[in-house]
Amino acid sequence: MCVIIYKPENQPLPDIETLAACYRRNRHGMGFCTSNGTIRHTMSFSRFCSELGKVDESEAVIMHFRWATHGSIGVKNCHPFHDKAHGLFFAHNGILDIETTRDRTDSETFFRDKFLPMLDRYGWDSKTFWDWVNVERGASRFIFMRGNDVTMLGGWYILNGCFYSNMNWQTNY
């Protein structure tokens, strides 16, 4: 199962052992985005760490380690996904009951084909919109970032000031 880590602004990044454990459990690609708009995707753990090391502690960061369930394994299917028009980043942990299109993940298919059109229709501050999002996500965890505005849905765990979508990375297999 994928794992998302959210590091709030002015918090330290998780240590290298934590990041390595997340990678060992989820080897199908990694990505991160920051509150200043940086986004990176890679299949290389060393490159991921190198790029993440350039992030200032003052920035909020969403990190995603992927375990593929829909869509091919490759950089193009790494989270987080970005919509430039809305200035919005999105990452997902879980499985959505959705038919995927064009070798995209269930996450990206949901984000581009369902979420964004509903956002345009109802607006970010609409209760109707967020009620719909919560029904659609089921048991999944979602995280959205627009600058310093972060919205997290689902159950999250806190460890050393960071939020984790699950703790499965802590177990050996």
Image: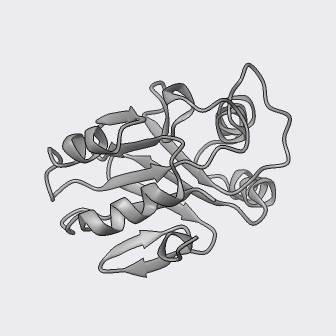
Residue 50 vertical position relative to residue 134 in the rendered view, above or below? above
Say left or right for 59 vs 126: left
Q: Residue 7, position in %: x, y?
A: 32, 63
Toward the top, the furthest residue is 102
Q: Residue 57, position in %: x, y?
A: 15, 59
Q: Residue 158, position in %: x, y?
A: 42, 80
Labels in figure, total? 0
Q: Residue 135, position in %: x, y?
A: 81, 59
Which corner quadrant of the image does residue 160 belong to?
bottom left
Q: Nearer the viewer, residue 116 or 173?
A: 173
Residue 61 vertical position relative to residue 106 in the rendered view, above or below? below
Residue 23 vertical position relative to residue 100 in the rendered view, above or below? below
Residue at (48%, 51%) from the top-left corner? Answer: 65
Residue at (34%, 45%) from the top-left corner? Answer: 45
Residue at (44%, 61%) from the top-left corner? Answer: 22
Look at the image and tell me in which quarter the C terminus lies. Answer: bottom right
Q: How is the image coloured?
A: one colour
Toward the front, the furthest residue is 173
Q: Nearer the viewer, residue 145 or 162?
A: 162
Residue at (34%, 68%) from the top-left corner? Answer: 18
Q: Nearer the viewer, residue 130 or 92?
A: 92
Look at the image and tell me in which quarter the N terminus lies. Answer: bottom right
Say left or right for 93 vs 60: right
Say left or right for 16 vs 163: left
Residue 43 vertical position relative to residue 137 in the rendered view, above or below? above
